[in-house]
Amino acid sequence: MRATTIHAPFDMRVEDVPDPVVQEPTDVVLRVLRACICGSDLWAYRGEAARQPGQRIGHEFLGVVEAAGSDVTGFAVGDLVVAPFVWSDGTCEYCAEGLQTSCPRGGFWGSVGSDGGQGEAVRVPFADGTLVKLPADAASDDRLLTALLALSDVLGTGHHAALGAGVTKGSTVAVVGDGAVGLCGVLAARRLGAERIIALGRHTARTDIARAFGATDVVAERGEAAEAAVRELTGGQGAHVVIEAVGTEQSMRTAVAIARDGGSIGYVGVPHGSGTGLDLSVMFDRNIALRGGVAPVRAYIPELLPDVLAGTIDPSPVFDLTVGLDGVPAGYKAMDERTALKVLVKP
Amino acid sequence: MRATTIHAPFDMRVEDVPDPVVQEPTDVVLRVLRACICGSDLWAYRGEAARQPGQRIGHEFLGVVEAAGSDVTGFAVGDLVVAPFVWSDGTCEYCAEGLQTSCPRGGFWGSVGSDGGQGEAVRVPFADGTLVKLPADAASDDRLLTALLALSDVLGTGHHAALGAGVTKGSTVAVVGDGAVGLCGVLAARRLGAERIIALGRHTARTDIARAFGATDVVAERGEAAEAAVRELTGGQGAHVVIEAVGTEQSMRTAVAIARDGGSIGYVGVPHGSGTGLDLSVMFDRNIALRGGVAPVRAYIPELLPDVLAGTIDPSPVFDLTVGLDGVPAGYKAMDERTALKVLVKP
């Protein structure tokens, strides 16, 4: 089959690789219908996260079961399923409590020796613990299929941030980050009942989506001016709930600065310097909490799926560029240069 | 009157200072019956927190109302009262929600221009918002009076850590720090229903108190050996709840290392390097939350007071050395050299 590989920073290729097969009785082989490129893939693309030459990539995908191991009970050939961005055994203590990202037998798509989502097919370990079934008729609904793809990562990750920061009915929320995760954070916050949602972002194409997703205010300023603007909007106090969806020093610094005393930061931006932006003395004096991390999206799919199917939430607008498999390298370039928000891949 | 002043690192004096008087109609003047020295006072003593020469010090005290301003409604001359370690107006939005440490009109005892607790008397601003009345007959019960003094800081601070970290019935808790706050964290965790409490500490005098307060296990190792010991005690996973009551880089590093995936750190150690011990990448991968800060003990006194009066919790054993006002400089030396755990002052 053909799949995306990374050979060096900025060197993405689409190559022939061995067809995946069922290796363990708990495996499934999935034919990928939709995949996408994640903002976090750019850390590898830019060489800021190390990869071995030829390593696969892509951790967001949905597709059709093509083969199933003898121990797989939940899925049959032909089933439409979505995969969360990590696999997990579904049976350990962590999986049982909904923290599948800490499953000792779990792993990330595209790690050494495993398939990535940006390819024609994927071997899925622990299929029963990992995959979630989708209605078969969704396969013929292009818009819905795209929306469902967001369950593999960005929608559940935005939800994790909103939950971690403690969004409840009536919350005032500020969202740092206008990427797909930040936008899904807006969607998740509105879904959880936030009354006021302040989206920080300068790109009107993105802030327009934020408004469509439920943002009540947009702050286009950056740095200290942004902090002042959020304070102005919140009676001088800051937001009770802040979603941090970038992971840089500056984004975390902003998150701390715009949080209200006694408030919380829900952080889901993969840390790339964000620890340095965390001034613990300030957080201590102001009792600002920090909760988040890598999102156990597997736990959230069953909760979010009905709303996506019903159309009460629709994350599909975060995908603004569609490519075939051969277009993946160009897709990376577009996201790196911020000419695309999130790239949909139709292998 | 006589009061403790700090002139330079390691230069504590007991000097004649002006008698406090009612300056605002909301003031009370309090005759101090009991005060004490806090672990956090040592940061000033050691010169690691800047002070102006002659500044007052001490933020934990209880005493008798000697004079009250015309607007004070809650207290009369002769009332026995305890003061939390910050004053607060009792009327603002933060006070109303129990975050008195963020009161815009609040302040710390011993800050420039204000009295400190380690003296004969204190002018208390916003007395109605700040003080809490104690039963008059407690004044004649030396042990009880000492226990009640812990409400001014260490007991409420330990409670804040336990609450922040989410201790509930059945929790497994690890406590980093064998000072008075860490020990009160043990007490608070047990009070909130923790089933297992692992106290980290090497000094048997302190760990004996921890056991008396409810610790089920003591880990005497330090650093990586301590981490291994806590993991050993928790089936390899670490503690769901960690109380960090020191504030150094090493203590926070230990707290992160011994937290279970998906767990929380309740931090109340005043940050002195602890931000550096916070590895955000590790916390992200393992979904470890951080919640805490300067404790709004004023909010907790009404809840904790009945238990102290009833004797169901008794923090008085944390005081292991008693001095008069003239003995305060020696008390600092004893705490700095760790020959005393916490010094009680009877002016």
Image (cartoon, coloured by chain):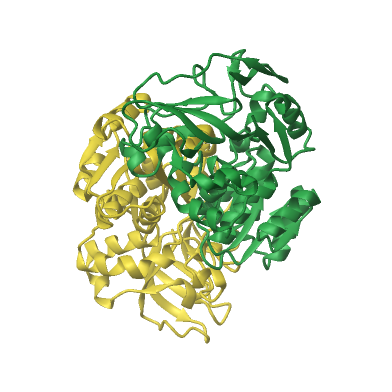
Chain colours: A yellow, B green
B267 on left or right of A174:
right
B301 on left or right of B146:
left
Question: Where the N terminus of chain B falls, by quadrant?
Answer: top right
Residue A262 falls in which quadrant of the image? Answer: top left
Question: Where the C terminus of chain B falls, by quadrant?
Answer: top right
Asked if residue B194 shows in the view, the reply is yes
Instruction: Give percent across and percent down for residue B320.
Output: 73, 43
Instruction: Give percent across and percent down for residue A289.
Output: 46, 45
Image: B40 above or below A56: above
Residue B327 falls in which quadrant of the image? Answer: top right
Residue A303 falls in which quadrant of the image? Answer: bottom left
Instruction: Tell which of A225 and B205 is nearer to you.
Output: B205
Residue at 59% x, 42% y: name it. Answer: B278
Instruction: Give percent across and percent down for residue A49.
Output: 56, 44
Image: A104 above or below A53: below
Instruction: Give percent across and percent down for residue A190.
Output: 25, 53
Residue at 53% x, 33% y: name it. Answer: A281
Instruction: Tell which of A60 and B149 is nearer to you.
Output: B149
Instruction: Tell which of A229 and B314 is nearer to you.
Output: B314
Asked if residue A176 shows in the view, the reply is no
Instruction: Tell which of A108 and B302 is nearer to you.
Output: B302
Image: A245 above or below B236: above
Figure disc tally: 0
